[in-house]
Image: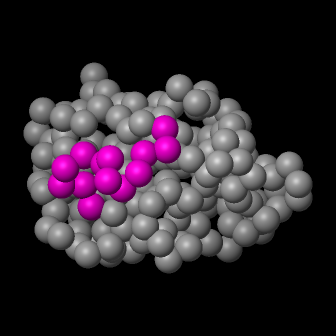
Amino acid sequence: MALQIHSPAFDAGGVIPTIHTCEGEDLSPELAWSGVPAGAETLVLLVEDPDAPDPAAPAMTWVHWVLYNLPANCRGLDRGIAARQLPDGTGEGINDWDKTGYGGPCPPVGRHRYFFRLFALDTVLPDLDRPSKARLQNAMEGHVIAEAELMGTYARQGG
């Protein structure tokens, strides 16, 4: 079975509920995955928006969440998970708000796509001390043995 990621909060390609955004409680959605390959040592989760700042003229990919060294036997994350509740050994990276942790959808204009990308690695990464997405991707190079993706969309109600 191939690596798969899904959320009970929204369907693939569907609308991310407001509770998981800046217009709601900004809680991370519950996530679940399956099909982690036998050779996997750890998992990486990246959540990003490639439509920033405007889907009609995207200029950058906005990083919403960076987690690494999730144990390979971890099968998901609870809704609104706090740093202290992450599985032992999990490292947090810096999002584009220059903070660790989840930052939910908050698009300035238009309907954006949000990609929850899960990677299975054949190694445990060293302590990267709150890495950026780029630094984490550098460390992951040559170690990705499987990946999966879940995409949801969101457009601000007030803007």
Is residue 81 located in the magenta-colored stretch of the structure?
yes
Magenta stretch: give its range. Answer: 79-91
Closer to us: 3 or 64: 64
Residue 132 appears left or right of 53? left
Q: Tell me what residue is drawn at x 65 percent, y 48 percent.
A: 25
Vertical side of 98 occupied by 107: above or below: above
- Determine whether, in the image, residue 144 is placed left or right of residue 95: left
Prevailing SS of the magenta stretch: loop
> Which image quadrant: the C terminus?
bottom right
Q: Residue at x 29, y 32 (%)?
A: 75
Q: Is the image coloured rainbow, by chain, by secondary structure, or in one colour?
A: one colour
Left or right for 106, reference 42: right
**Residue at the image point whose x is 73% and y is 69% from the top:** 53
Where does the image place residue 115, in percent across and percent down from the top left? 54, 49
- Where residue 130 sits, quadrant-wise, is bottom left
Rendering coords of residue 56 (x, y %):
81, 62
Q: Is residue 158 visible?
A: yes
Q: Position of residue 142 (x, y in %)?
A: 19, 61
